[in-house]
């Protein structure tokens, strides 16, 4: 089988399996998997900047929340329909990431991490500050009646699952295309040796800026869809935890692989799910995973798989 | 209360904040300066100090002073030991790589925080101050007979708060003396100045790192023990000190102890006064943006030596 | 016609004047060697031409146009290719991808693939396409650097100590490669290996303490007493 065929088979197969599960999963896991797919889309967005371009952001919750609140506030404050609301969320994410990239990309390495962390914190605090509109930490529910997209009730579990699957498929497909396109290959090269890429005639600043905008926009799309599908927007999605989680998911699943984000999100979701049944302190799992991965497996599961077995894994 | 006394009160409160903040920030600054890494778990070491203080006070019993003194000694030692252990088991194997250290210390943050949640619980618990007399403070006003002193109601401080300021100043003086005059301080400064040369001269750099990491954590823990009779011990109390220490270190300058202390004074005092006029949330927003913008606009940033 | 010019190009670092007001002309098609003792300022000079560091004073002209204010990547796009003094390939990427990155600015699809293969063949690395660049021997990595330079079809190719660390056989191969490019590409070659300089350079510029000490044919330079003194260190 040619390399391209293998790649399509693997990723197409994953999508097919996920679609099929729609019909066999019990209600609890059905709902979980819908969440996981949307969060995996977020992770894919994050991975484009972290895994492929090599920029470690600690502030992606800003984009996720921009999408979520862009969408949710359009409905709550202006009574918009779901489709324009979603679009607003995506556009909000694009604008916020474009602006943040202009500032943050003036720094590198550790300073970049701190700057993104700080801006995301400022964003979270701003959501709290304008609690009159956002209801702060408490958040607000998006009524079922407002979640009917083109005649389809998104509150219905089957529709919701399919919508989550659709988002995930689009993001997965996009990422697959991106990493094989010239732009994506330049990003990888920038990750490996930015100086050299510059001296080959590429405007590396522009590439990094674009990568951040793409990453932020996908993250915002995930945030907007998440809010719409599960009918809730709250400040917790803008908090630092939602910046650390995609990092964790991508590290676990394999940074710089297309399917890694999904694997990491799936595993971590269930690990935390199980842990929170045992203790209030379920984020301990996240802490242990972060330390363990940094020490022993920085490549993550997908990365190890690619290194040892499937060298063709994108 | 009128504006004058109100500001004086805010300044006094701010001085206490500044004192504790200076200790915490110096701990972070030492680690930045000598090891060139950012410890995101620094706030959790602070929190650990407060929680351990509570445990010690419970265990020791008797008059509050006894438990407090014991905590003042034990908490920094225990937290320092934990930090040294973390450095040896986690940071040393990754070669103190700056980016990986940030990720690892985020993990450490969650581990410490959640373990405390599991053992100590989500409640906030008080620790009694060893002594706590109210001290009224006079203010001036124009009367018929000219200037006269009076004691506005509410304008007061406590003997304990004054003691905190004094203790912090004492410890900071001790740290400065250690850095400037002791052999250990010399080793630390040599390692900070040029790690390669230090290695070439046979300085056990890795052990210096473990010690510096321990001292940094111990200072934060000590600061927390000092503040815990005024606030309370809670498993989430590390977040604000972390942010504030960051601001102080970034504004005060990398590895510069005088700069850190001055910045802590500035931030601590203004935090108190700003809270008079602005909501705390808005103040925090401005503070976070300030940190970000300083890093963005300073030409080589904070980490000039290894950045870019 | 002159491809590359510098006028009064200078660079100081604090008190140290690394390059002192250099006027330099390189005609199109020439193979020029830039030599000088260690610390003469050769790499600093060349980095100012490429745009990796900004000059303290002076101007750089490419094809008559003032490129002094252009960032590095724009100068590369105008036709300068630069190989690093310390090998800087993408170690974790396959050899083929290294060359493809260099060529992708110009080409795509079939043409890209063909150009990559041609460049690898030209430097003698045909067949190594799938290997990771980091696993190549030092000498082969230097050849890869040159392939990356050639595939860009530059007007000016700057080679910074290309034969450093190469075995004799590899150096011979390199000499043949460069000789084959005579008349096709303008080359500025920084070299310490006098043998290579003598055989490949049409003209030689000698830099010493940041200023041009002498310029001429290899023979003229070889016989120049000032140059000999500079290298041997006698006053």
Image (spheres, coloured by chain):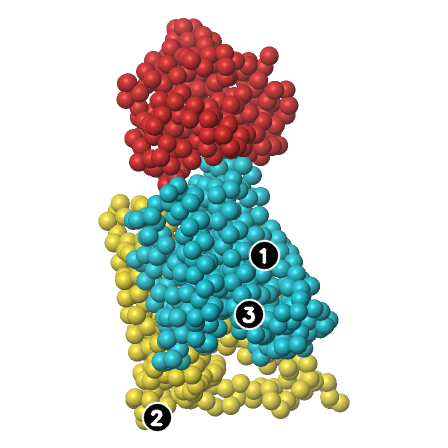
Q: Residue furthest bottom?
A: B62
Q: Are marks 3 and 1 on the same chain?
A: yes
Nearer the camera: disc 1 or disc 2: 1
Considering the numbered disc 2 on the image, is that residue within a helix, a strand or a loop? loop
In the image, farthest residue toward the right: B144
- Which of disc 1 and disc 3 is earlier in sequence? 3
Up-down: is B165 above or below B29? below
Circle 3 or circle 1, nearest the eye: 3
Q: To which residue does mark 2 refer? A: B63
Chain coloured yellow here? B
Can you identify the residue that label 3 sits on?
A: A160
Residue at 51 percent across and 63 percent down: it is A165
State the separation of the CA atoms marked 3 and 1: 21 Å
Q: Residues within 10 Å of mark 3 (few under 14, many from 20)?
A: many
Instruction: Label 3, secondary structure: give it.
Output: helix
- How far apart are labels 2 and 3 at the CA level? 61 Å
Q: Residue B74 appears at what percent x and percent y?
A: 30, 78
**Residue at disc 1, secondary structure:** helix
Chain A drawn in what color?
Answer: cyan
Q: Is residue B228 above or below residue C179?
A: below
Mark linked to residue A217: 1
Give the chain of mark 2. B
- Residue placed most toward the observer, C129 or C42: C129
Q: For the residues carrying marks 2 and 3, which lies nearer the camera in this image?
A: 3
Q: Is residue B147 left or right of residue C123?
A: right
Q: Which chain is red?
A: C
Looking at this view, is A275 or B139 the one in front? A275
The answer, for residue B305, to whether it is visible in the render is no
Chain of the residue that carries numbered disc 1 in the rendered image: A
């Amino acid at each position: 089988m040619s390399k391209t065929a293998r790649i399509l088979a693997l990723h197409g197969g994953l999508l097919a399996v996920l679609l099929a599960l729609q019909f066999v999963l019990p209600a609890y896991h059905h709902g979980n998997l819908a969440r996981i797919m949307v969060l995996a889309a977020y992770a894919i967005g994050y991975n484009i900047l972290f895994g492929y371009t090599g920029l470690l952001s600690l502030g992606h919750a800003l984009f996720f929340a921009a999408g979520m609140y862009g969408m949710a506030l359009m409905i709550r404050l202006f009574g918009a329909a779901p489709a324009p609301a979603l679009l607003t969320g995506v556009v909000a994410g694009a604008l916020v990431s474009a602006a943040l990239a202009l500032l943050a990309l003036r720094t590198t390495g550790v300073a970049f991490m701190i700057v993104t962390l700080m801006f995301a914190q400022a964003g979270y605090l701003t959501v709290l500050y304008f609690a009159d509109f956002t209801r702060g930490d408490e958040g607000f529910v998006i009524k079922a009646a407002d979640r009917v997209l083109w005649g389809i009730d998104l509150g219905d579990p089957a529709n919701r699952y399919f919508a989550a699957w659709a988002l995930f498929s689009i993001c997965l497909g996009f990422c697959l295309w991106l990493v094989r396109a010239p732009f994506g290959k330049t990003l990888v090269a920038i990750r490996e040796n930015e100086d050299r890429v510059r001296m080959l005639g590429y405007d590396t600043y522009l590439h990094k800026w674009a990568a951040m905008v793409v990453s932020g926009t996908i993250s915002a799309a995930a945030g907007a869809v998440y809010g719409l599908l599960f009918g809730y927007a709250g400040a917790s999605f803008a908090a630092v935890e939602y910046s650390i989680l995609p990092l964790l998911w991508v590290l676990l699943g394999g940074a710089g692989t297309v399917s890694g984000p999904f694997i990491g999100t799936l595993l971590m979701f269930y690990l935390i799910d199980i842990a929170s049944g045992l203790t209030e302190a379920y984020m301990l799992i996240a802490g242990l995973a972060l330390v363990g991965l940094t020490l022993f497996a920085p490549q993550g599961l997908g990365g190890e798989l690619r290194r040892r077995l499937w060298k063709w894994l994108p | 209360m009128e504006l004058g006394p109100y500001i004086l009160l805010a300044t006094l409160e701010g001085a206490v904040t500044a004192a504790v903040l200076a200790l915490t920030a110096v701990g972070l600054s030492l680690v930045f300066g000598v090891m060139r890494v950012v410890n995101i778990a620094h706030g959790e070491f602070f929190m650990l100090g407060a929680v351990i203080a509570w445990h010690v006070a419970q265990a020791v019993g008797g008059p509050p002073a006894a438990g407090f003194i014991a905590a003042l000694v034990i908490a920094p030692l225990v937290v320092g030991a934990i930090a040294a252990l973390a450095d040896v088991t986690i940071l040393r194997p990754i070669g103190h790589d700056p980016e990986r250290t940030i990720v690892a210390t985020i993990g450490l943050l969650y581990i410490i925080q959640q373990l405390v949640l599991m053992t100590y619980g989500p409640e906030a618990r008080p620790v009694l101050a060893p002594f706590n007399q109210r001290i009224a403070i006079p203010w001036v006003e124009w009367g018929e007979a000219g200037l006269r002193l009076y004691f506005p109601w509410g304008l007061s401080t406590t003997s304990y708060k004054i003691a905190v300021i004094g203790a912090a100043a004492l410890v900071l003086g001790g740290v400065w003396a250690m850095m400037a005059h002791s052999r250990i301080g010399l080793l630390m400064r040599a390692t900070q100045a040029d790690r390669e040369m230090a290695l070439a001269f046979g300085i056990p750099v890795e052990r210096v790192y473990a010690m510096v990491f321990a001292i940094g954590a111990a200072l934060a823990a000590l600061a927390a023990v000092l503040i815990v009779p005024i606030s309370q011990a809670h498993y989430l109390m590390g977040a604000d000190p972390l942010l504030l220490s960051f601001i102080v270190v970034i504004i005060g300058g990398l590895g510069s102890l005088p700069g850190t202390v001055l910045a802590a004074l500035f931030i601590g005092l203004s935090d108190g006064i700003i809270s008079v006029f602005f909501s705390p949330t808005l103040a925090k927003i401005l503070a976070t943006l300030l940190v970000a913008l300083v890093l963005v606009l300073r030409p080589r940033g904070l980490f000039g030596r290894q950045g870019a | 016609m002159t491809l590359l010019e510098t006028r009064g190009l200078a660079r100081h670092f604090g008190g140290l004047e690394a390059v002192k007001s250099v006027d330099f002309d390189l005609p199109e098609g020439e193979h020029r060697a830039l030599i000088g003792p260690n610390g003469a300022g050769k790499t600093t000079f060349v980095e100012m031409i490429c745009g990796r560091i900004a000059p303290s004073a002076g101007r750089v002209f490419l094809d008559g146009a003032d490129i002094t204010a252009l960032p590095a990547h724009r100068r590369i796009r105008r036709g300068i290719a630069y190989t690093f003094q310390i090998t800087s390939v993408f170690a974790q990427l396959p050899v083929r991808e290294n060359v493809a990155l260099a060529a992708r600015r110009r080409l795509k699809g079939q043409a890209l693939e063909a150009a990559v293969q041609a460049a690898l063949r030209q430097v003698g690395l045909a067949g190594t396409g799938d290997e990771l660049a980091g696993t190549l021997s030092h000498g082969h990595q230097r050849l890869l650097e040159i392939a990356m330079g050639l595939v860009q079809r530059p007007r000016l190719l700057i080679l910074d100590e290309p034969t450093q660390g190469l075995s004799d056989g590899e150096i011979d191969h390199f000499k043949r490669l460069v000789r084959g490019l005579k008349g096709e590409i303008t080359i500025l070659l920084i070299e310490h290996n006098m043998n290579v300089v003598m055989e490949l350079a049409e003209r030689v510029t000698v830099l010493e303490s940041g200023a041009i000490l002498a310029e001429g044919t290899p023979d003229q330079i070889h016989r120049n007493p000032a140059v000999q003194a500079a290298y041997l260190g006698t006053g």
